[in-house]
Image: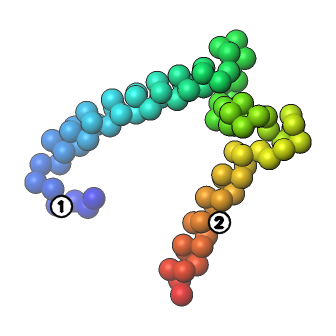
Amino acid sequence: MFAGETRDAGRTIMLSAWIAAPVIAAIYILMSGAMLAYIPAAKVDLTGPIPQVLAAAFGGGAAASGGVDWGWCWGGLQSWRWRWRWWRSTR
């Protein structure tokens, strides 16, 4: 948003913060609950929770079972999707 696009910038920023803070807290709480549904609390790895949950949900990562590491696949898919969009926008 550029300067001058809103009538009361202070009110708008405060409103957005009051809306965003509970949403972010809810996402964090739900993610933690989902993580604890798949992994016991004593085994939770706080340095890489999302790959750990994906590995537990899909039966182990590539290192554990020789299968597909879904975290890497999802990241690669997203990367190629954005590259494709950029390439199409330059044509």
Question: Which quadrant does the N terminus fall into?
Answer: bottom left
Q: Is residue 42 above or below residue 13?
A: above
Residue 52: give its label.
Answer: none
Residue 81 placement: quadrant = bottom right
Please tell me which residue lies in front, 51 or 55. Answer: 55
Residue that appears at 10% across and 54% down:
7
Position of residue 64 relative to residue 8, above or below, is: above
Residue under label 1: 5
The image shows residue 34, relative to residue 54, as above or below, that is above
| Residue 46: percent from left, percent from top | 66, 25
Q: Nearer the viewer, residue 17 or 26?
A: 26
- Contact (CB < 8 A) between labels 1 and 2? no
Name the quadrant containing residue 55. Answer: top right
Tell me the SS state at disc 1: loop
The residue tagged 2 is 80
> Residue at left 53%, top 22%?
33
Q: What amino acid is found at the position of numbered circle 1 in the picture?
A: Glu
Residue placed most toward the observer, 82 or 64: 64
Q: Is residue 48 visible?
A: no
Instruction: From the viewer's perspective, tell me whether residue 58 is left or right of residue 7.
Output: right
